[in-house]
Image (spheres, helix red, strand yellow):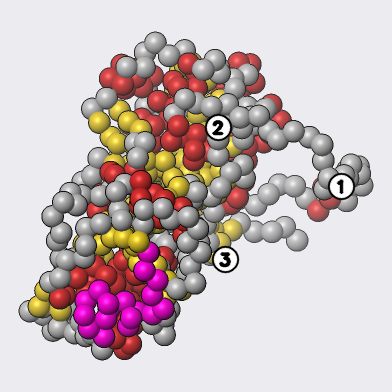
């Protein structure tokens, strides 16, 4: 019996048995479209296939060669450079600078001697040339094309055989043998499969641009992120000029690595020392400010945690968080009240990470608690102090990884004091006075004179 059509949500990829106006999985409206069944019948798997060659895990092969771009921040996120035959997916909010970043990357790779093609499905070739002129890239030997028909694009790539091809974007590509509109789940999945398959067979590195949903995830089926070798997110707040390129998946390097850029009138400029970038003027101590020594991938980064605590005129106090998980804030407030007898009832709490940075590490718990207490008690934390440590529900401070690297980065920027959990492996923290605390109660008593 032939299998009937299925219905797929274009927002989250959930499969439904029948059409509905609202997706039960993600709650999106008018996002469910019909997908035609595969035409291959049951006899397609009846024929006997050929055997495959098996090998053991031991190998004498050299690691894949890498082509540096000349952009140190980009090379860091890629794991050291571009790997041939790799497939890279880049996502980000509209207008955040994805096309600008990739056009600069294409020009940088081309200037190192790589043959690069930039295929735009969203802009005309004249528009891309205008951007290149504004960025000062017109002298770069980048081949430019504007097309959405994937069959024509693959034919061109097979003829030109570039070292790198950039496809901007996957949501505009369409295959004439898939009966659905461009940007649909079927088209995105089929186009991604063809591009990745071409990259592996022809040895061409391909960078694919992907749109994101309102939740910040790359739009389309989740299987696309599993197909590619590397998934990069280009992040940033529109009110800030700083942009962060973050690797969330990388088969050729560390995940969670970041590259920091600054958006200027001449395009994206690399930021060699992001720690100094995310710290405000530290000459005058201010209540509600604490410096967190964090780790992003393999890079230590110092960021400033800012807090404001004020009496609330509302029955339910406000809890506003920017750059941190709101759930962690609720947990830290509960621990402070339950374990340290410091209530925040009737108080509005505002928490922010300076510079538009986003912190996901549990190691930021101690710095968050310090900023909250500093704002509540109107007592400034010494400006030469950094903090890090995870807070458990019992109020204990748990040690975190790469303590030595955190302290070295702080010392390099002129910090002389640090608060760390007990049992932390300090290593050689030259020039740093490190005080180790067993729990949150001891920290409150020593720094704020209460507990």
Q: Please state if 39 lies on the left or on the right of 166 as rendered.
A: right
Pinpoint residue 336: horizontal percent, then vertical percent.
29, 82
> Is residue 47 placed above or below 71 in the rendered structure?
below
Quarter of the image with the N terminus is: bottom right
- In depth, the one of 10 and 57 nearer the eye is 57
* Residue carrying label 1: 56
Sequence order check: which comes first, mark 3 or mark 1? Answer: 3
Pinpoint residue 232: horizontal percent, then vertical percent.
48, 44
- In depth, the one of 367 and 42 nearer the eye is 367
Label 3 or label 2, whichever lies nearer to me, is: 2
> CB of mark 3 within 8 Å of CB of mark 2?
no
| Magenta stretch holds residue 447 | yes
CA distance separating discs 3 and 2: 44 Å
Pinpoint residue 387: horizontal percent, then vertical percent.
34, 64
Residue at 71%, 47% in the rendered image: 39
| Magenta stretch holds residue 312 | no
* Residue carrying label 3: 17
> Is residue 377 placed above or below 195 in the rendered structure?
below
Sequence order check: which comes first, mark 2 or mark 1? Answer: 1
Residue at 38%, 80% in the rendered image: 439
Residue at 24%, 67% in the rendered image: 371
CA distance separating discs 2 and 1: 28 Å
Pinpoint residue 223: horizontal percent, then vertical percent.
59, 51
* Residue carrying label 2: 81
Give the residues in magenta. Answer: 434-451
């Amino acid at each position: 019996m032939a299998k009937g059509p299925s219905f797929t949500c274009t927002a989250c990829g959930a499969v439904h048995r029948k059409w509905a106006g609202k997706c039960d999985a993600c709650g999106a409206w008018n996002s469910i479209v019909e997908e035609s069944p595969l035409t291959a019948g049951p006899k397609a798997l009846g024929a006997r296939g050929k055997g495959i060659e098996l090998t053991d895990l031991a190998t004498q092969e050299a690691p894949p060669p890498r082509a540096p771009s000349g952009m140190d921040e980009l090379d860091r996120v890629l794991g050291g450079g571009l790997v041939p035959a790799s497939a890279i997916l880049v996502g980000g909010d509209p207008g955040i600078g994805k096309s600008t970043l990739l056009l600069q990357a294409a020009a940088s790779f081309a200037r190192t001697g790589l043959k690069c093609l930039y295929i735009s499905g969203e802009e005309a070739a004249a528009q891309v040339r205008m951007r290149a002129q504004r960025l000062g890239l017109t002298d770069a030997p980048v081949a430019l094309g504007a097309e959405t028909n994937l069959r024509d694009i693959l034919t061109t790539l097979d003829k030109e055989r570039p070292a790198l091809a950039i496809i901007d974007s996957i949501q505009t590509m369409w295959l004439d043998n898939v009966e659905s509109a461009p940007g649909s789940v079927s088209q995105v999945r089929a186009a991604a499969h063809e591009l990745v398959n071409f990259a592996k067979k022809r040895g061409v590195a391909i960078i694919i641009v992907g749109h994101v949903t309102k939740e910040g995830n790359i739009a389309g089926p989740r299987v696309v992120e599993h197909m590619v070798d590397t998934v990069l997110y280009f992040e940033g707040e529109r009110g800030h000029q700083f942009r962060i390129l973050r690797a969330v998946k990388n088969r050729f390097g560390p995940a969670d690595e970041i590259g920091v850029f600054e958006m200027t009138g001449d395009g994206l400029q690399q930021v060699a020392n992001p720690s100094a970038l995310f710290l405000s003027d530290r000459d005058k101590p201010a209540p509600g400010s604490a410096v967190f020594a964090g780790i992003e991938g393999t890079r230590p980064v110092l960021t400033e945690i800012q807090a404001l605590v004020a009496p609330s005129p509302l029955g339910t106090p406000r809890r506003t968080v920017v750059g941190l998980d709101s759930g962690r804030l609720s947990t830290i407030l509960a621990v402070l009240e339950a374990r340290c007898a410091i209530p925040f009832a009737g108080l509005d709490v505002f928490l922010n990470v300076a510079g538009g940075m986003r912190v996901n590490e549990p190691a930021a718990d101690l710095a968050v608690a310090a900023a909250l207490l500093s704002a509540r008690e109107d007592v400034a934390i010494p400006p030469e102090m950094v903090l890090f440590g995870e807070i458990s529900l019992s109020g204990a401070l748990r040690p975190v990884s790469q303590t030595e690297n955190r302290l070295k980065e702080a010392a390099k920027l002129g910090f002389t004091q640090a608060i760390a959990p007990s049992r932390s492996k300090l290593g050689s923290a030259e020039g740093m006075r490190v005080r180790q605390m067993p729990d949150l109660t001891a920290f409150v008593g020593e720094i704020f004179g209460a507990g």
